[in-house]
Image (tube, rainbow, N blue to C red):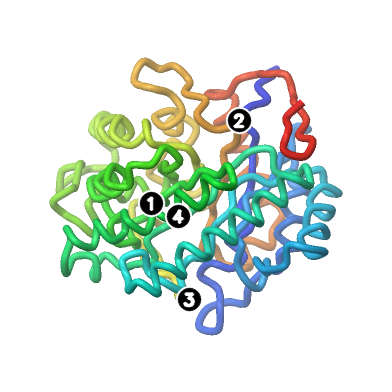
Amino acid sequence: MNENNFPKLHNATWPGIVGKGPDSEPTIAFDKMLEMTAAAEVDGVRFDGVDIGLLEPHINIDDTGDGIKRLADKVSSLHLEIGSLVAPIWGGPAMGSKEERAQFVEQVRKSCIYGSKLRELGVRPHGVIRIDSASTPESWAKDPVNNTKLIAQTFREACDVAADYGEKLAAEGEICWGGMHSWRTMLDTLEAVDRPNIGFQADMSHTLLYLLGYNRPEDRILPKDFDWNDRETLHQGLITLTNALRPWTIDFHVAQNDGTVHGTGSHDKTGRHCLATDPNGKLDVAHDAGYWLRDENGELTKAFKHICWDGCMFANEVMMKQQTWNDILATMVKVRQQHGWYEPEKKLVGDTVQ
């Protein structure tokens, strides 16, 4: 029997919102996402927690009184904990006007307050605040140098705010965000921020598209005529990618991708999240997670205490089937079996781990 108890296994709640809406499918209620997560079980193993998007209609980020207490009680009652949080920063692009950038930073501040309250309530023992540039690659490309400087300036201000609350910010590596839409632009942005509490959020579905240079062909790693059956070339490509970005990685999403892009609702095209059992998936998920979870010498980095499944833009019909979440959990368990570790459990009391 595999006794690894870390990293903790989390499910994301925001797939109930992302890609949904008036021009797509109805959102799935937060409570329903929690229930499906809590009900998943594989050989006695369950999800340990959830990562949460601080997004309407799931969450009112301004309700840090009774509302957040009810949320903490609800999650705890299902024997789950809370990890990373997504800051709702899309009202003001990080490379926008002075007022827009100030709005971005304010949303990060609100997210940090929310996260600190969850820590005080004892339900959030670890995790980061996720951000992106809230800007398109097309807008960024009009003035790459200055736009990268603006994004970095905004991120620096956000990092300084986050530091006041003991939080780290993870920049999401996704091809739909300007200045973060290729592995090189992502590195340039992170290096320009120059703050100790900034890092990278790697999502296996999104980062696979980095290899293809979808929104920035000059940064493509795999050859144009790449054959997905050529695992050795894919292996070398993943090594190049992860050696560059792994040192920055402080948050990690397990996911599958079929090598294509997808977008629904108001969400722009990005790496297609496939079901864990999708026969068209290009990744050997449990094996390939190791490129991110282990260093170049094969040693575990232990850079974060939990990993999360992010399955955005699945059809509601799929997401409402319990088997979907059982299959996802089974994949997460395999990742932990191959790349996890054991350590004595600690309890969070207020802001103190005991």
20 lies left or right of 348: left
In the picture of the structure, the residue carrying the numbered disc 1 is 156
* Few, some or many residues within 10 Å of mark 3 (<14, 14–19, 20+): some
Residue in the image at 45% along x and 40% along y: 197
* Disc number lying in front (3 or 4): 4
Residue 265, which numbered label? 3
Residue 332 visible in the picture: yes
226 lies left or right of 18: left
In the picture of the structure, the residue carrying the numbered disc 2 is 7
Mark 1 and mark 4 in contact? Answer it, CB < 8 Å: yes
295 lies left or right of 187: right
Secondary element at image label 4:
helix
In the picture of the structure, the residue carrying the numbered disc 4 is 158
84 lies left or right of 191: right
Q: CA distance from mark 2 to mark 3?
A: 33 Å
* Disc number lying in front (2 or 4): 4
